[in-house]
Image (spheres, helix red, strand yellow):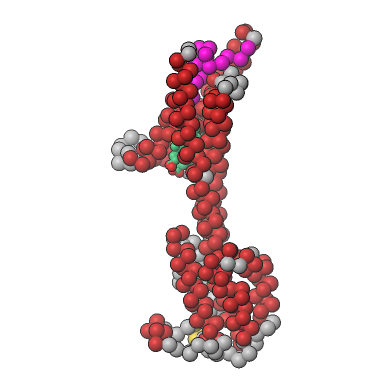
Amino acid sequence: MLIDRKNWQTHSRWCFAVVFITLASVVWFCCLRWYSGEWAGGSSPTGFAFGLIGGAIIVFECFLWVRKKYLRTWRIGRAQTWLKIHIWLGLLCLPLLVMHSGLRWGGWLSFVLMLLLIFVVASGVFGLILQNILPKRMLEEIPAETIYSQIDTLGGQLFSEADRLVSVTCGTKPLVTSAELESGPIVVGAIRTVGLVQGKSLELRPAVPIADAEALKMFFENEVASFLRRGREGNPSVADASKSAVLFQNLKTQVPPAAHDVVSAIENFCEQRRQWDTQARMHFWLHSWLLVHFPFSVALLVLMLVHMFVALKFY
Ligand code: HEM
């Protein structure tokens, strides 16, 4: 969920309420300590009330998943509203439950419960921060953004195109094959059509063999091919934009000026692959935090029910 200046007004009421309830509870909690000489624990009326409210919030928090998974079509409020409440109540339950504990770790069950609560809230905050940073960065840094699941396939296509271009330029492939007769000749400097990237506007012209350009072929095979196919793990040097710029600059000194456009075109292919790599990395971070948040939430809910059962039995 995006929280910015535009929608802050819809969050501000929740933020104010959470801050107010937290401060009021802390003041009350401290007053009790002042009068009784000890921190109110879970068995005191105030501590019990904190536990009850915090527990109810945890049940509500987990219900977000049920709502998303099974009750999508039910008219029980917009998903955005649910998420907004999820965020602010999630933040509120931490101080309430810390006070419910009477500022003591207790036995192993309450210790594990507290750790889980801290992990769940911290991972939620972390995920929220990522949701607010990464989509904006994607928009700015990845003009070639594409469908995530197609990145590997598109990398393969990029490799095939680059391979054809290099092979024709170095004279190791016939100028026009029967397949190319149908799809058109290989062009140097074509503006990329996959994704939204606008490649450098090079002069468009059909690729032709260029004498003494063997260094291009070797460079392509040693440095570029595996990168276009597998991204960073294929070649970390080309994955690094500044190292890659040096490598390509160096290559230009080893091939005749007539081949420089082709070198630039291959460099452009690498830039596109780099953007897809960045996209895959951001996609991973944008989704992987839920792999902590969700299972830990389920564990928290289950252990909390056990804790309630045990505590009420001996109350
Ligand atoms: C005890 C506290 C909490 C519990 C038990 C809890 C539990 C959950 C559960 C079960 C989900 C659904 C996972 C899924 O859709 O696969 C979820 C999603 C989420 N939670 Fe929490 N959560 C808690 C606190 C927080 C806090 C404090 C924040 C942020 C400040 C937060 C932010 C989020 C976000 C951003 C999502 C993803 C929603 C989406 O994009 O669909 N959560 N949480």
125 within the magenta span: no
Question: Which residue shows up at 47% across the image and 39% down it?
Answer: 295
* Count of residue discs: 0
Q: Position of residue 233 (x, y in %)?
A: 58, 63
Boundaries of the magenta span: 38-54
Q: Position of residue 65 (x, y in %)?
A: 40, 38
Query: Image height check: is 284 above or below 192?
Result: above
Query: Image height check: is 269 above or below 42?
Result: below
The quadrant where residue 256 appears: bottom right
Q: Is residue 5 visible?
A: no
Q: Position of residue 150 (x, y in %)?
A: 44, 63
Query: Image height check: is 177 above or below 160?
Result: below
Extreme-bottom residue of the structure: 211
41 within the magenta span: yes
Q: Position of residue 87 (x, y in %)?
A: 49, 35
Between 37 and 8, the one lying in front of the other is 37
